[in-house]
Amino acid sequence: MLKGQEIVKNRKEIIEALNRAAAAELQAAYRYLYLSHYATGMHGREVAENFEEMAKSEWEHVSTFLKRIIQLGGTPFQKLAEAEKLSYAKFIPPPKDATDWERMLKDSIKGEQEAIEFYSDLYERIESTDPVTAHIVREALEDEVEDEHELANLLE
Ligand SMILES: [Fe+2]
Ligand SMILES: [Fe+2]
């Protein structure tokens, strides 16, 4: 076993949490990308640009978590169908009305808040046992806090 894996005592639990995170990030990335093309109307297009940026950052989170799962000797989920039940957040489908950017923002804020809750709990749990994952989770947490703030600003 690699030393980098050996030092993590609760490896199994962490791999599980990272799988839940990767699944949630995958859903978030797809949702934001979808909304970036879907949102119409004057303010809707402005909001869409933000969704496009956020989709990219959520994809990066997917990548970071996949990489860490493999580093720890785990197996990331393989079937996309598994993502929905693994994810720590429920997928919120886009609103029927493509001009309803307010709904899109409010649902997105909810998603970010679920992410913030999950990552801050996880960070606390693993801070002393797995500083490497804790660092990654903390960076994701910082991004989601920024996302929440940006989305809230767009609502005003
Ligand atoms: Fe994310
Ligand atoms: Fe986010």
Image (cartoon, rainbow, N blue to C red):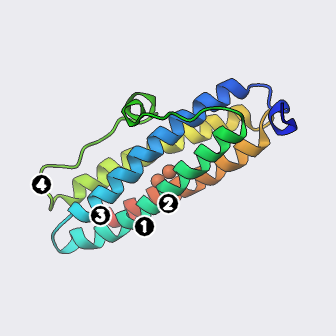
Q: Residue at x 60, y 32 (%)?
A: 75
Residue 36 is labelled as 3
Q: Which amino acid type is marked by label 1?
A: Glu
Report the residue marked by disc 2: 57
Is residue 120 shown above or below 43?
A: above
C-alpha separation, residue under disc 3 versus residue under disc 2: 13 Å
Is residue 28 shown left or right of residue 78? left
Q: Which amino acid type is marked by label 2?
A: Ser
Which tag is nearer the camera, tag 2 or tag 4?
2
Is residue 5 shown left or right of residue 108? right
Q: Is mark 1 on a helix, strand or loop?
A: helix
Is residue 27 shown above or below 126?
A: below
Residue 53 is labelled as 1
Report the residue marked by disc 4: 97
* Quadrant of the frame with the N terminus: top right
> For mark 3, does the 10 Å Cα neighbourhood hold few (<14), some (14 to 19), or many (20 or more) residues?
many
Which badge, 1 or 3, comes first in the chain's sequence?
A: 3
Q: Position of residue 42 (x, y in %)?
A: 18, 75
C-alpha separation, residue under disc 2 versus residue under disc 4: 26 Å
Tell me whether the residue at label 1 lies in contact with that at label 3, contact meaning CB atoms closer than 8 angstroms.
no
Is residue 42 shown left or right of residue 22? left
Which badge, 4 or 3, comes first in the chain's sequence?
A: 3
